[in-house]
Amino acid sequence: MNVLLVDDDQVLAKGTAKLIQRLGGHQVYIADDPVEIFYRCQIGAVDLILMDVNLPGAQWKGQAVSGADLARLLKNHSPTAHIPIILVTAYAMLTEQEALLVTSQADGFYTKPITDYDAFLNAIAQLCGTN
């Protein structure tokens, strides 16, 4: 499976990508630029998006956007609406998670730091129907 990992922390993203590749056997691409994210998704190079909610400096059409904003934009764009999106963040309380899922239209939520990669990979597999 081709996974797009959207994260502004490149060091954390590279470590997470290596673990997903090694433990899950998935190809992982890292991006934090909305234009690149939309491009990869529109050309069919993405089977799943792991989207950090906090993306400081990210801009889409001149407007600052969060990962939740990008998820909603992708879900409302017919060529990319089918791609499962899991929001990943360290900053949301349990009560905020449901609101983030509703506003972003994402398919799932996972809290950072990811400590149990087997459970995380199982959640990915269930969401994508590969389990």
Image: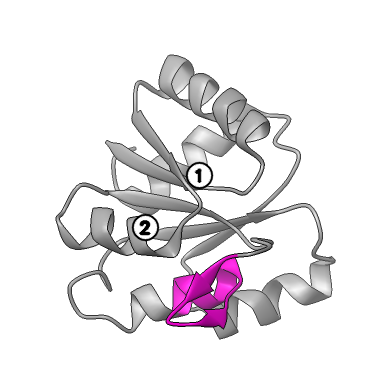
Whether residue 69 appears in magenta in the rendering, the answer is yes
Of the two numbered discs 2 and 1 in the rendering, the one whose residue sits closer to the viewer:
2
Q: Is residue 105 above or below residue 91?
A: below
* Mark 2 touches mark 1? (CB < 8 Å): no
Q: Is residue 106 above or below residue 62?
A: above
The answer for how far apart the CA atoms under marks 2 and 1 are is 22 Å
Residue 4: quadrant of the picture: top left
Please tell me which residue is depicted at 51% across the width and 57% down the height of the picture.
86
User: Which range of residues does the magenta coloring cover?
Assistant: 58-72
Q: Is residue 120 shown to the viewer in this render?
A: yes
Badge 2: residue crowd in 10 Å (few <14, some 14–19, many ≥20): many
Quarter of the N terminus within the rendering: top left
**What is the three-letter code of the residue carrying label 1?**
Ala
Quarter of the C terminus within the rendering: top left
The residue that disc 1 covers is: 123
Residue 34 lies, in percent from the top left, at 43, 64
Please tell me which residue is depicted at 69% across the width and 62% down the height of the picture.
56
In the structure shown, which secondary structural element does the residue marked by tag 1 occupy?
helix
